[in-house]
Amino acid sequence: ITNLQDLERYAPYAIESYFLMVQQKKASLMRELIVDNNALRSYLGIREKRQIRTQLRLMPDTHPIHNDMILQRDTLYLFSFGARSYVTILHDETLHQTFTSLFPWLLQQGEQPMR
């Protein structure tokens, strides 16, 4: 789950790193939930050019989301962007189960990107 405007502003290198990781792993099981704003357009173009095939859904830009969240295996990564960006890494089984339960519901709420 991310807001690309904040990611581009505070950690632009992270987008390129993410694309490289996805291409190397052929990660078709990866799912993305992204805030629909101006930064999304260039991201979609790069995804198409690089033939990135992950499940992608969009969230409206009506609620403030100014961070990035990654759920991987048994770990939850919470990135906070700003003048002092940082990441909180949580290895907690019950917290991981909670977010693993919430994420599919959030994806269902998201909209398919327009082509």
Image: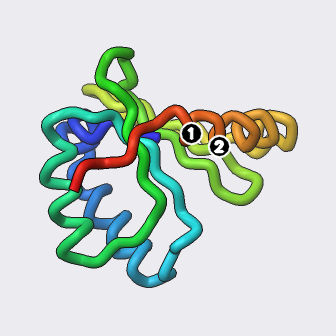
The image position of residue 91, as x and y in percent, is 76, 45
> Would you say 99 lies left or right of 58 here?
right
Q: Nearer the viewer, residue 95 or 89?
A: 95
The image position of residue 16, as x and y in percent, is 26, 65
Amino acid carrying mark 2 in the image? Pro
Label 1 crowd (10 A; few <14 / some 14-19 / many >=20): few
- Mark 2 highlights which residue? 104
- Which type of secondary structure does the marked residue at label 2 adopt? helix
> Would you say 100 lies left or right of 61 here?
right
Frontmost of labels 2 and 1 is 1
Q: Are marks 2 and 1 in contact (CB under 8 Å)?
A: yes
Which of the numbered marks, if any, corresponds to residue 108? 1
What residue is rendered at 73% in x and 43% in y?
100
Which of the numbered marks, if any, corresponds to residue 1? none
What residue is rendered at 18% in x and 38% in y?
9
Eyeballing the image, is 40 above or below 14? above
What residue is rendered at 70% in x and 37% in y?
99
Q: Nearer the viewer, residue 26 or 77?
A: 26
Quadrant of residue 50 within the rendered picture: bottom left
